[in-house]
Amino acid sequence: MSTPETRRVLKRIFGYDSFRDGQQEIVDHVTGGGDALVLMPTGGGKSLCYQIPALVRPGVGIVVSPLIALMQDQVDALRALGVRAGYLNSTQDPDERRMVEGEFLSGELDLLYLAPERLRSESTRRLLERGEISLFAIDEAHCVSQWGHDFRPDYLELSRLHELRPDVPRIALTATATPDTRREIATRLRLDEAKHFVASFDRPNIQYRIVPKSEPRTQLLELLTSEHAGDSGIVYCLSRRSVEETAAFLVGKGIEALPYHAGLDAATRLRNQSRFLREDGLVVVATIAFGMGIDKPDVRFVAHLDLPKSVEGYYQETGRAGRDGLPSTAWLAYGLADVVGQRKLIDGSDGDAAHRRRLSAHLDAMLALCETVDCRRVRLLDYFGEPSAPCGNCDTCLAPPRSWDGTVAAQKLLSTVVRLRRERGQKFGAGQVIDILRGKRTAKVSQHRHDELSVFGVGSDLGDAEWRAVIRQLLAAGLLAVEGDYGTLVTTETSDEVLYRGRTVPMRHDPSTRAAARGAPRRDTEARARRVEVSDLDEAATALFDRLREWRAEAAREQGVPAYVVFHDATLREIATRRPSTLSELGAVNGVGDTKLTRYGKGVLEVVGAGQHGA
């Protein structure tokens, strides 16, 4: 199929004049009948890579997606563009399913979304054998990786798609995968001969910041009130209890926050998710069960109150911010307890030694990202095999941390752990070890006569927080370990290298103040300029943008769809900047396709005209 044909569809249906980097080649390859494995960041435009070929090729595009709760919104968004879309999943009654199946067989659909478990059904397989299919798209393909962060057993069945219809091209897509995971996806889905497309993993509009954890909820509140007042965002916590308590804390501080975790009943989860998608300015506090496939483009921040288990998980979760390309924040509060807790979880995990080694490797990479004194974006992209230069838009670039020679401090701490074991046959957690080092004569120190140890008081030159940072960094470097339910500190095989063999231990000074605020200098690249240029509005444009958002909210309520289904924020900002006065001028705005121009054009021009008249 020709490039002009796919470009016409891009403009007529989706309202864009040109493809983003990498999209055109993928679209043309799949449109021509080729198989593809696509790695592209969240917000990079993965869906267009299968939607446009499905619209150009004869037949119906079958999209396998694990996101049952979001299929209705995905289909609504496509229908708003004039695309004939439907879905089949367990939420439908038999009559609804029969209607959609009839539309599929009669060629009345362009795209049909399926949950992966439906492919286990013999009736579904027979249905797919009877209809004309343009392509198979396997979304969230990392779910096939058994050691990935979102493993779904049903995805292991998707290799059968090739057996079912060997004549139909397949495209598997994911927002995150290391080279090892990429190979596993190709093998498990029988895409060994597929062409691989790997886009840049860089999200230059996201500012990555990792702060020392002191009072995390208070720190979170400061972030929200000082930088993201009124913004939509996601806060991730590891436990259900923490989700509930954090949401209640934010509500008590006047921030509208909703909890989301697997312990809530299905109706509550669906209601909270729906509100987040449909309303502006809501914060969802959630476990990692929330977020995959959330297509809300104007999430302005993603915050983590607990350490993610892997760089893949962290990247996937932070990628839910700023899908519209506008400036957004990825913020993580990280402390000693996170490292201790994660190490304990790994030690107590199910699975064999090889599995625990994989988990440890994932955690080690995450800790290296947290402890780096270099550019976080460089470290993050390097994990995915992408070389880069310092970004100028992360905390370590904006406020470079100081490093110091922590060798003597490490020796003092490791000596204390060793002497407790050798001289007293004891093991203690971080608190007691720090009290010994600082020479504190607490009741517990006196009870165990730890003030008689030769190391008592040798660390009085550092404060509690500084010693906790030392322990955290030794744990991150594998020079110290924790064991047991109480997180007691023990030495490792490499501890002797520091104690007796002259190994030096460079350490990172935790910043004492908040990293540089928004608006600090950013890397001057064409990609960044294209993505953020519409974020800087003058006073009149800002007022018009706010009126357009009000109009959009009312239009979305009338149709019962999320606001972004009507128009993205980026489209409204461009309208506010250009102030079109005719349908032709409005049709030239990115994100305004033919169907949306017909459906919403008059209303948009009335809002713009009223603003100009008022001005």
Image (cartoon, helix red, strand yellow):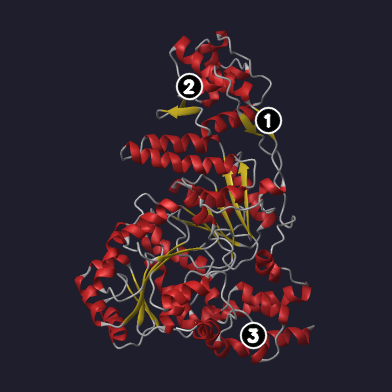
Q: Which residue extends farthest left?
A: 122
Q: From the viewer's perspective, is 575 left or right of 237?
A: right
Callout 3: few (<14), some (14-19), or many (20+) C-alpha neighbours within 10 Å?
some
Q: Nearer the viewer, residue 180 or 520?
A: 180
Question: Is any atom of residue 76 visible in this view?
Answer: no
Q: CA–CA distance between discs 2 and 3?
A: 67 Å
Callout 1: few (<14), some (14-19), or many (20+) C-alpha neighbours within 10 Å?
few
Q: Which residue is mark 2?
A: 428
Of the numbered discs 2 and 3, the one sitting upstream in the chain is 2
Q: Residue at x 51, y 52 (%)?
A: 384
| Amino acid at circle 3 | Ala
Q: CA–CA distance between discs 3 and 1?
A: 55 Å
Q: Which of labels 2 and 1 is toward the front? A: 1
Q: Residue at x 38, y 53 (%)?
A: 263
Q: Residue at x 51, y 82 (%)?
A: 3
User: Disc 2, disc 1: CB below 8 Å?
Assistant: no
Q: CA–CA distance between discs 2 and 1?
A: 27 Å
Q: Which residue is mark 1?
A: 404
| Amino acid at circle 1 | Trp
Q: Nearer the viewer, residue 391 or 521?
A: 391
Callout 2: few (<14), some (14-19), or many (20+) C-alpha neighbours within 10 Å?
some
x and y percentages locating residue 592 in the rendered image: 59, 83
Q: Which residue is mark 3?
A: 588
Image quadrant in which the C terminus is located? bottom right
x and y percentages locating residue 175 in the rendered image: 48, 61
